[in-house]
C-alpha cells in the first residue's frame, strides 16, 4: 500500500479552488504510483469554515464540486477528502464532519468524526452531529484502514490536558485490527503541540499494533495558523516519515518499505517564528493584500513585527513609519532607522510635534487647558494611529499592529492609537517571549532559518541595541514601562497562570506571589476587556489567546 500524504493549505470557503488543489496533489500522487491520496480534515472547505456551513447554496456546491472531482480522476488514484456529510434525518445540526472516498465510480461518505470539540476556538457542535464508529475502510487490494478525524485521536487522559466526554474511537477499532490507522486533522499550532500529537499517535499505534498516519492542514486562516508537521509512526512509535512544518507538501509512504525518514524537529523558537511568518503571509494573501505597513518606534515589539513581515511578504513589500515626538530619544530614532536599513524596508520619518501642538490648541476651549497626563500620552498614540491608517488606506496596505500579549492583558495600549490595524502579529506573545524570540533570531543558531526565510543570514537582524534597552512607550520624558507595570519577569508568569491555566488567586499567593500584586494584575486584566474586544485579530500560538476562544464579559465584577 502506497499512501500519498497531501499537506494542503486551503482557502476557507473556496470549494472550487480547494478541489483544484486536491486534484493537483492527485496528479503528483498518481505519477508516483500512489494507492490512495489523503487530504486533511474538511480539506474541501478549509478549516474552520464556521457559519459558511449554514449556507444551503454552498452545501449544494459541495456536491457539484465532488462530482467534478470524480469526473477528473480518469486513471488517477482514489482520494480521501474532508467534507461536510449530511445527516439522513435532517434534524439540526444536520451535518457530520466527515471523510468521503472519491474515485472514478463516484463518491461516498466513509467516516464521520465522533468527538466534536467545542472548547477554546472550536465550535463544532454548532454545525455537526457526532458520528458513530468504528470507521473502517477496506481498499480494493484488501488493505484495512481505520479512519479517524482530528479529535478522535485525542483520547489519552495521561497525555492530554482535557479529554472530551464521549466514545473512544481508537478502542472501537481494536477488534477490527486495521492495517493502518489514518487521522485526518486540522490542528492549529501551539508551542509543544507537535510533540503531543506524536505521543498520542504513538499510543494509538501501540494499542492497535499498526502504523499511524497523521495528516494535518497547513496555513493561516484568520487567527489560526496550522503548522502541518504531518508524520507516520510505526506500531512501536518509531518515526517512519515526517513532513516539513509550515509549508505545503505531498509525500509518499509505502507500507512495504517503511524506511526511517525522520528529520530534526525545529526548536520552539524556530517553530514560533515560522508559524508567525506563515500566519502573516496567509492573512495578507487570503485577504487580498500584497503589501503591509507598520510603525517603527525603535523598540523590540515593532522590531520583531518588522522582521516577521519582511520574511512573510518580502522586504520590498513592507513600508515603515517612524513618528517621533519631542519625547522620543535619539537612540530610538537611530535604532528604528538602522533596523529598516538592515531589513531593506521602505522607511519614512513623520515627526508629530506640530500635530501635538495643534491638538493641544484645539482642545483648550473644551478643557480650559491643554491635555495632560494619560490624556496627553494617548493623544500621541492616536495621532500616530491616524497617520498609519491614512497611509495604509492611501497605499492599499495591510496595517500591522505591534502590541504584545502582556500589554493587551493589562490594557497598556491605546484604543484608536497603537491598537489600530488589521492584524496583531504578536498579540499572543508575552513580552518576555518577545525578548526570547529576538535573542534567538540574532543568535548563530538561527542563521539557517533566517536564510531560509529570506532574512539576512549574517550578523544581527534585530540588533543588540534594541534587544537590551529597557522597554518604554516614550510618551513622556524618561518614561519606562516599569513606571506603570510590574517588571515583565514578574508580570508574565502571573498573566500566564491567570489566562492560560485559570489559576485561582489564592493558589498563586500560596505559591509565593505577593498578594497585592496578584490582586492588581487581576484587576488590570478584568478592566482591559473592553479594549481587547475592539482589538485587531491576532495570530494564536498559545493554549489561550485573546481571540475567539476568550469569551469573558465586559460588564462584570
Image (spheres, rainbow, N blue to C red):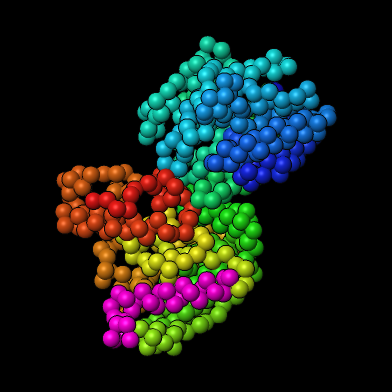
Number of callouts: 0
In the rendering, at what x and y percent does residue 77 appear? 76, 28
Q: Residue furthest top?
A: 175
Q: Is residue 365 magenta?
A: yes
Residue plotted at (47% across, 59% down): 536
Q: Is residue 354 magenta?
A: no
Where, by quadrant of the figure, is residue 484 drawn? bottom left
The answer to whether 445 is drawn above or below residue 500 in the figure is below
Query: Magenta part of the protein: which range?
Result: 364-393
Toward the viewer: 51 or 156?
Answer: 51
Toward the viewer: 137 or 90?
Answer: 90
Q: Residue furthest right?
A: 74
Residue 47 visible in this rendered orientation of the protein: no
Residue plotted at (41% across, 37% down): 119
Viewport quadrant of the N terminus: top right
Query: Horizontally, is 388 left or right of 519 in the view?
Result: right
In the rendering, at what x and y percent does residue 288 appear? 64, 58
The answer to whether 454 is drawn above or below residue 103 in the figure is below
Residue 125 visible in this rendered orientation of the protein: yes
In the rendering, at what x and y percent does residue 431 appear? 37, 60
Q: Main secondary structure of the magenta part?
A: helix
The answer to whether 212 is drawn above or below residue 286 in the figure is above
Residue plotted at (27% across, 65% down): 485
Query: Horizontally, is 478 left or right of 46 in the view?
Result: left
Query: Horizontally, is 334 left or right of 45 in the view?
Result: left
Query: Horizontally, is 36 left or right of 380 in the view?
Result: right
Amino acid at each position: 500500500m502506497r499512501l500519498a500524504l497531501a499537506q494542503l493549505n486551503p482557502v476557507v470557503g473556496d470549494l472550487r479552488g480547494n478541489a483544484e488543489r486536491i486534484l493537483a496533489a492527485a496528479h503528483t500522487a498518481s505519477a508516483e504510483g500512489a494507492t490512495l491520496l489523503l487530504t486533511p480534515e474538511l480539506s474541501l472547505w478549509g478549516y474552520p469554515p464556521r457559519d459558511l456551513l449554514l449556507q444551503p447554496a454552498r452545501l449544494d456546491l459541495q456536491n457539484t464540486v465532488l462530482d467534478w472531482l470524480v469526473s477528473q480522476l480518469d486513471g488517477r488514484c482514489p482520494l480521501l477528502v474532508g467534507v461536510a456529510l449530511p445527516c439522513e434525518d435532517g434534524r439540526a445540526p444536520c451535518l457530520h464532519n466527515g471523510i468521503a472516498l472519491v474515485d472514478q465510480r463516484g463518491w461516498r461518505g466513509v467516516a464521520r468524526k465522533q468527538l466534536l470539540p467545542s472548547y477554546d476556538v472550536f465550535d463544532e457542535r454548532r454545525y455537526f452531529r457526532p458520528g458513530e464508529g468504528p470507521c473502517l475502510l477496506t481498499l480494493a487490494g484488501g488493505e484495512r484502514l481505520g479512519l479517524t478525524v482530528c479529535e478522535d485521536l485525542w483520547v489519552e487522559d495521561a497525555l492530554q490536558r482535557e479529554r472530551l466526554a464521549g466514545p473512544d474511537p481508537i478502542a472501537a477499532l481494536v477488534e477490527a485490527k486495521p492495517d493502518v490507522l489514518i487521522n485526518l486533522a486540522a490542528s492549529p499550532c501551539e508551542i509543544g503541540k507537535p510533540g503531543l500529537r506524536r505521543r498520542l499517535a504513538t499510543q494509538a499505534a501501540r494499542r492497535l499494533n499498526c502504523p499511524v498516519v497523521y495528516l494535518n492542514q497547513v496555513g493561516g486562516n484568520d487567527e489560526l495558523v496550522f503548522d502541518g508537521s504531518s508524520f507516520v509512526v510505526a506500531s512501536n512509535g518509531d518515526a517512519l516519515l515526517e513532513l516539513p512544518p509550515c509549508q505545503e507538501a505531498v509525500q509518499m509512504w509505502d507500507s512495504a518499505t517503511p524506511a526511517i525518514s525522520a528529520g530534526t524537529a525545529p526548536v520552539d523558537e524556530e517553530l514560533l517564528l515560522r508559524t508567525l511568518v506563515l500566519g502573516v503571509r496567509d492573512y495578507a494573501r487570503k485577504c487580498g493584500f500584497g503589501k503591509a505597513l507598520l510603525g517603527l518606534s525603535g523598540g523590540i515589539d515593532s522590531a520583531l513585527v518588522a522582521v516577521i513581515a519582511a520574511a512573510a511578504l518580502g522586504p520590498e513589500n513592507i513600508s515603515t513609519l517612524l513618528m517621533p515626538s519631542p519625547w522620543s530619544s535619539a537612540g530610538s530614532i537611530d535604532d528604528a532607522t538602522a533596523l529598516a536599513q538592515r531589513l531593506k524596508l521602505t522607511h519614512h520619518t513623520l515627526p508629530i510635534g506640530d500635530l501635538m501642538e495643534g491638538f493641544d490648541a484645539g482642545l483648550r476651549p473644551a478643557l480650559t487647558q491643554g491635555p495632560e497626563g494619560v490624556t496627553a500620552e494617548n493623544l500621541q498614540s492616536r495621532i500616530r494611529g491616524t497617520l498609519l491608517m491614512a497611509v495604509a488606506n492611501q497605499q492599499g496596505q495591510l496595517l500591522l499592529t505591534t502590541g504584545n500579549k502582556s500589554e493587551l492583558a493589562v490594557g497598556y495600549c491605546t484604543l484608536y492609537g497603537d491598537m489600530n490595524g488589521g492584524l496583531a502579529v504578536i498579540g499572543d506573545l508575552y513580552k518576555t517571549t518577545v525578548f526570547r524570540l529576538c535573542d534567538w533570531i540574532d543568535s548563530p543558531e538561527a542563521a539557517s532559518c533566517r536564510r531560509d526565510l529570506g532574512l539576512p543570514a549574517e550578523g544581527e537582524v534585530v540588533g543588540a541595541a534594541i534587544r537590551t534597552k529597557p522597554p518604554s512607550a516614550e510618551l513622556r520624558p524618561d518614561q519606562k514601562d516599569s513606571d506603570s507595570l510590574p517588571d515583565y519577569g514578574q508580570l508574565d508568569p502571573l498573566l500566564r497562570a491567570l489566562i492560560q491555566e485559570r489559576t485561582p488567586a489564592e493558589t498563586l499567593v500560596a505559591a509565593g506571589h505577593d498578594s497585592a500584586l496578584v490582586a492588581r494584575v487581576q484587576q488590570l486584566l478584568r478592566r482591559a476587556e473592553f479594549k481587547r474586544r475592539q482589538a485587531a485579530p491576532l495570530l494564536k500560538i498559545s493554549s489561550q489567546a485573546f481571540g475567539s476562544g476568550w469569551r469573558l464579559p465586559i460588564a462584570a465584577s
